[in-house]
Image (cartoon, rainbow, N blue to C red):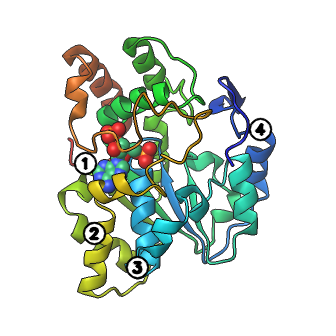
């Protein structure tokens, strides 16, 4: 159940969230009262960064490569969204060990995460491809308002005036945790370049020893083609009142560099300028740099 139809946003401490299934009360509870458990595993992303891909990988690793859970249970039930009304309710009832999802920036994440041994897997993607994927997605999902033409959407993205706020703030905040042993980050581009090696690294982080055969099954079942066919993760089960299936699908192209088909060079340079301001101090090199 996704909640009731809505096209407007709500604001929480200056950040936008879709009104659909979100409320300031739920977000505030998340921040100050939600109890993180040491055995929780969180799939954390900024929207359109490969959330559902990572969720599929984590679901398959959890089941030692056996795809039955990923093929029979909807992805939002396998890893509920802790910040949404329905998701939080499901998270509170989830028998541990929990697999949970979140798009929250670090400053709105449960305070009880601090000092816990819960694990966070943070996936990030080139901001230019994120804008591209996000722009298309706003036209498919009714939870988003129409941000107008591409240039207006880009402006909103650069100033954090889109749901879940600024990509730059999100990434800089979460990557501040690097080096902490319960925090792992990986890029969408690394998943693409070496899915097998990535699955091995993620399994190791989770303390799971998978055989070569089990890893092969994770890789095969988390491939773009397999996921596109799996109704439990491809969003084809999202009711028409929330998603216009005639306008596109979640697994749209699944490639890197598609921004070149949407953004002008000048728009690309505008992203570069803001990117450099924020990312310079981080001291990390990403595959897209
Ligand atoms: P595109 O819109 O560029 O195709 P999220 O899950 O965070 O909403 O991200 C969605 C993006 O991840 C979409 O990008 C989608 O195609 C891509 N994606 C999902 N599963 C994938 C997979 N197995 N391989 C490659 N890309 C995948």
Q: Earlier in the sequence, mark 4 or mark 1?
A: 4
The Cα–Cα distance between marks 3 and 4, rounded to whole angstroms, is 38 Å
Circle 3 is placed at which residue position? 66
Q: Earlier in the sequence, mark 3 or mark 2?
A: 3
Q: Position of residue 18 (x, y in %)?
A: 64, 32
Whole-percent x and y of residue 31? 72, 51
Calculate the distance from the C-alpha at mark 4 to the C-alpha at mark 1: 34 Å
The residue to which callout 2 is attached is 219
The reply, left or right, for residue 112 in relation to residue 101 is right
- Expressed as whole percent of the image width and height from the top left, the position of residue 117 reads 58, 75
Name the residue located 50 percent from the left edge and 60 percent from the top edge: 43
Label 4 Cα crowd, 10 Å radius (few <14 / some 14-19 / many 20+): some
Q: Quadrant of the C terminus?
A: top left
Viewer-side label of 3, 1: 3
Q: What residue is disc 1 on?
A: 286
Secondary element at image label 4? helix
In the visual, does 156 lie left or right of 80? Answer: left
Q: CA distance from mark 3 to mark 2?
A: 11 Å
Q: Earlier in the sequence, mark 2 or mark 1?
A: 2
State how far apart marks 4 and 2 are (Cα). 38 Å
Mark 3 or mark 2, whichever is nearer to me? 3
**Res. 24 mark:** 4
């Amino acid at each position: 159940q996704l909640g009731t139809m809505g096209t407007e946003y709500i604001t929480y401490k200056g950040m936008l969230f879709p009104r659909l299934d979100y409320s300031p009360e739920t977000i505030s509870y998340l921040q100050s009262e939600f109890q993180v458990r040491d055995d929780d595993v969180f799939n954390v992303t900024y929207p359109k960064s490969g959330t559902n891909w990572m969720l599929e990988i984590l679901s398959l690793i959890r089941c030692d490569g056996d795809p039955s859970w990923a093929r029979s249970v909807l992805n939002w039930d396998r890893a509920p969204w802790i910040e949404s009304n329905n998701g939080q309710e499901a998270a509170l009832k989830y028998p541990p060990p929990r697999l949970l999802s979140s798009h929250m920036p670090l400053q709105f994440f449960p305070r009880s995460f601090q000092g816990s041994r819960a694990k966070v897997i943070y996936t990030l993607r080139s901001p230019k491809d994120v804008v591209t994927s996000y722009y298309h997605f706003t036209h498919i999902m009714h939870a988003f308002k129409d941000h107008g033409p591409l240039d207006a959407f880009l402006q909103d993205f650069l100033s954090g005036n889109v749901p879940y706020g600024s990509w730059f703030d999100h990434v800089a905040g979460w990557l501040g945790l690097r080096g902490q042993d319960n925090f792992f980050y990986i890029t969408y581009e690394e998943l693409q370049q070496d899915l097998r090696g990535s699955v091995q690294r993620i399994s190791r982080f989770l303390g799971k020893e998978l055989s070569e055969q089990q890893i092969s099954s994770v890789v095969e079942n988390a491939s773009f083609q397999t996921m596109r066919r799996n109704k439990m993760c491809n969003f084809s089960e999202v009711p028409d009142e929330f998603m216009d299936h005639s306008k596109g699908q979640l697994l749209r192209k699944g490639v890197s560099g598609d921004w070149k088909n949407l953004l002008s060079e000048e728009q690309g340079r505008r992203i570069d300028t803001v990117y450099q301001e924020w990312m310079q101090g981080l001291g990390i090199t990403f595959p897209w740099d």
